[in-house]
Amino acid sequence: MEKEQKENIQDENLTSEEDIQSAHPQDQTNDHIDKKKEEDKKELTPEEKIFELEDKIARTFAEMENQRRRFEREKEDAFEYGGFSFAKEALSLIDNFERSKNILESDEKLRGTDALKKTLEHFEIINKDLISIFKKNNIKQIDSLNKKLDPNFHQAMMEIEDDSKEPGTIIQEIQKGFTIKDRLLRPSLVGVAKKTPEKTTKTQEIKENSETK
């Protein structure tokens, strides 16, 4: 009788363990994966561990070097072109001097007077000083007149009939353009030459007549 009771108890224990295992199959799988990872880690040889550390160190140094280079580039740009915005705004001073000069020169009451002459002389001195300061900071005026239109530095605002110049030649500068080192501060606003319609028509007629002959 006692033997049968012991066997029944053992059967119940086995059944309960099986029920627990069947009730939590995912937990058992996760435990198995974790154990496998730990075993894999334990299987690394000292040489493999050293190689793994060296690889991590190499990657870290590479990232640090990239950051250093980015910082150097940003620092150089800040040093070279840090005054870009200020220089661009400062160009308005030259524009205002030019406008003031034109207004004074076109004033009938002042024309030919000593007061106008002296005022313009002072304007010219101040303008030269500004240009000199700009040059020291690698800010240069774009050479425009009698040049062929370059879209990188010039912006055509109008076409002017002029048969003495090749079409597209800059013959008027409306607003001066400037560069700072290798960058454009602002383009020159210019007027370019074009052939008169009559000349163009006559040239075309002569060409057509010569071809028919």
Image: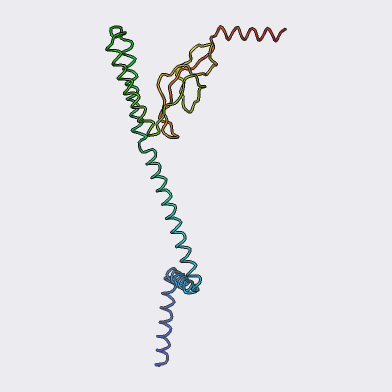
Task: Say which residue appears at 40% left-offset and 89% top-offset.
Answer: 6
Percent of width and height locating residue 204: 62, 10
Q: Is residue 53 above or below residue 202?
A: below
Query: In the picture, which quadrant includes the C terminus?
Result: top right
Percent of width and height locating residue 207: 65, 10
Q: Which color mode does the image show? A: rainbow
Task: Say which residue appears at 42% left-offset and 92% top-offset.
Answer: 3
- The furthest residue to the right: 213
Closer to the camera in the image, 202 or 183: 183
Q: Is residue 150 above or below residue 62?
A: above
Q: Quadrant location of residue 14?
A: bottom left
Percent of width and height locating residue 132: 36, 29
Closer to the camera in the image, 165 or 191: 165
Closer to the camera in the image, 213 or 112: 112
Q: Quadrant location of residue 176?
A: top left
- The furthest residue to the left: 115
Closer to the camera in the image, 114 or 141: 114
Q: Is residue 79 above or below residue 99?
A: below
Task: Say which residue appears at 34% left-offset and 23% top-offset.
Answer: 127
Percent of width and height locating residue 52: 48, 66
Q: Is residue 213 above or below residue 99?
A: above
Query: In the picture, which quadrant includes the N terminus?
Result: bottom left
Total number of numbered labels? 0
